Amino acid sequence: MFPDESVQASIDLKAKVLLPIHWSKFDLSIHPWDEPIIRVTQEAKKKNVKIATPMIGEVFDLNNLPRNPWWEKLRN
């Protein structure tokens, strides 16, 4: 799915939280590695969808969602 489709799917499924996965593990695409998370967080904000953005491997509680844009600190 594209980022906007993922947000819409979470709406359609009446998800309480959107947790994007498989977007930063490997840099194999022609777009920047962080483009998917930038697009999905923008779309989620636009459509008022609650989103969790943990770092790879980060453990978190659903009552305390990680929403820190950690990928911004890694941009060149």
Image (spheres, helix red, strand yellow):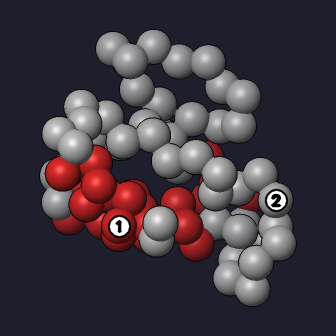
Disc 1 marks a residue whose amino acid type is Glu
Cα–Cα gap, marks 1 and 2: 21 Å
Q: Residue at x 57, y 35 (%)?
A: 54
* 44 left or right of 46 in image: right
Q: SS of the residue at dot 2?
A: loop
Residues 74 and 50: in front is 50
Judging by the rendered image, the residue that carries numbered circle 2 is 26
The residue depicted at 36 percent of the width and 42 percent of the height is: 18
Q: For residue 16, what is the image quadrant?
A: top left
- Is residue 60 shown above or below 28? above
Give x and y (percent) for residue 15: 25, 36
Q: Amino acid at mark 2?
A: Phe
> Would residue 27 appear left or right of 75 to someone viewing this image?
right
Q: Which residue is mark 1?
A: 5
For this view, does 56 lie left or right of residue 42? right
Badge nearest the viewer, 1 or 2: 1
Dot 1 alpha-carbon crowd within 10 angstroms: few under 14, some 14 to 19, many 20 or more: few
